[in-house]
Each structure stands twice: as structure tokens, then as C-alpha cells.
Amino acid sequence: MALSPTAAQRRVIAAADPATGRLKGTDAQLAALVKRGLAFRHPRPPHDHFLTPAGHRIREVGGEPDGVAVAPEPPVAPDAGGVFAARVGGEEAAPGDTGPARLREVRGAWQGLLELRRMTHADGSTDRPCAWERTHLVRAAALALEAAGHRPAGPDGGDGYRVRATPQPEAVAVYEPDGTALRGCAATLERAGWHVGEHTEPRTRARYLLASPRKV
């Protein structure tokens, strides 16, 4: 967890290109934003710096007071500590975790993730998951579902998706008791660049999705 940017750094963030998040500033300013997880240095020449999803959120709200912690990495809905976490299903919704404000948070995180895909894929594509998603499978799949309007399950169960880790490398399980909604989740993940298959649990006969990020 890193501290929020200084006033000078917030001015650099505010001046970022609104479409690409490209930053201009001194080497020290850019390095400090990278350290705080609010920017990243593009691996290809000319090695420009761009806002991360956390940096985009700072820019959208006009910055946070000094000393407030911000997330040092891409997506995931504000919890009590101020870190954005995608709803994986089954958790208790935090105060302010519903309504228009929540929708804006989720959509902003998804747009930030698409930008991260574009800037970290050699071909600039946004149609398949990036390295961050491969190391945060549950949160990445949950963000794709929530951003598309699917409803996560509540703590007491019932309808709604649940995304869970599996023993299988690079795969998550998605549960949704409503068959039509489950197929909708499959379509959403496929559009987001995931390979998806529908399976049945041998013991309970419950249907679920097994999803893994597409590589090409």
C-alpha cells in the first residue's frame, strides 16, 4: 500500500492525456508515480509513462488528500480500507458498494483494465487478458462479470454469480444457480477473452463454468 500523490504529482496526473493516460513530467515525478502504483513505464521505446487504473481513478476524482492510502495495482470495489475489489460473490456488500457510485467505480476499473491490456500487449490488443489478470484470476473474472452488469450472489446465497479459485492452473470456477444467467456469464467471459466450458459437479449435479484466460 502506498501513499497518495503529492500536490505536484496530482497536477501531473490531472494533465494526463484523457484518452490514453499518457503522462508528461520530470523523471523524478514519473518514477514516484510508478512507485505509488499510479503509473507504469511502457516496455517498448520510447518508454513513455501511462496511468494505471488506480491512477485513472485519482484523475477522475481530482486526487485524494496526502496520506490517504491507494491501491498499488489494477482493478478490484472499495472495501473499508479504500482498496477497489471486484465482487466475487458471497461477500457482504460494504457501505456505498451499491448504486450509481458503485457502477462508476466498476466501469472505470474495467476501462482501466482494457487500457492496461492495450499498453502491455505487444500488438496493442484489448481482446484477451493481460499478465495482471493471469495472476489475479478470480478478481479479473469477477470484474468482467460485474462490469457487464451481472449480479454477484449475496452472503446468504440465492441467485447471483460466485467466482472461485480451482486447483487447475489458470482456471476459475463460476457458479450461478440460474441456468440462463450462467449461460449469460459464459457469453460475457468469452467476449472478455476467456475460454469457457460448462461442466457438472459429479456429487451435486450443479452446473458451473470453468474459465481460463485466452492467450491468443
Image (tube, rainbow, N blue to C red):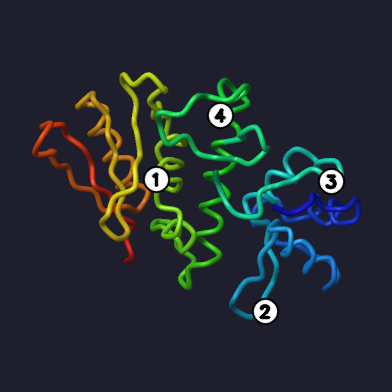
Please give the residue where the numbered disc 2 appears in the rendered image.
Answer: 46
In this view, the residue in front, 166 or 22, is: 166
Give the number of the mark in front: 1 or 4: 1
Image quarter hosting the C terminus: bottom left
Please give the residue where the numbered disc 4 appears in the rendered image.
Answer: 103
The alpha-carbon separation of the residues under discs 3 and 4 comes to 26 Å
What residue is rendered at 45% in x and 61% in y? 130
The alpha-carbon separation of the residues under discs 1 and 3 comes to 31 Å
Q: Position of residue 168 (x, y in %)?
A: 26, 57
In this view, the residue in front, 214 or 48, is: 214
Is residue 116 positioned above or below 206 on the image?
Answer: below
Neighbour class for label 3 at 10 Å: few (<14), some, many (≥20)? Answer: few
Please give the residue where the numbered disc 1 appears in the rendered image.
Answer: 141
Q: Position of residue 10 (x, y in %)?
A: 84, 51
Image-quadrant location for residue 23: bottom right
Give the number of the mark in front: 1 or 3: 3
For the residue marked with disc 3, what is the amino acid? Answer: Gly
Neighbour class for label 2 at 10 Å: few (<14), some, many (≥20)? Answer: few
Q: Are marks 2 and 1 in contact (CB under 8 Å)?
A: no
The alpha-carbon separation of the residues under discs 1 and 4 comes to 17 Å
Neighbour class for label 1 at 10 Å: few (<14), some, many (≥20)? Answer: many
- Which tag, 1 or 4, sits closer to the chain's start? 4
The alpha-carbon separation of the residues under discs 4 and 2 comes to 35 Å
Please give the residue where the numbered disc 3 appears in the rendered image.
Answer: 67
Image-quadrant location for residue 79: top right
Image-quadrant location for residue 199: top left
In this view, the residue in front, 114 or 211, is: 211
Q: Secondary structure at mark 4?
A: helix
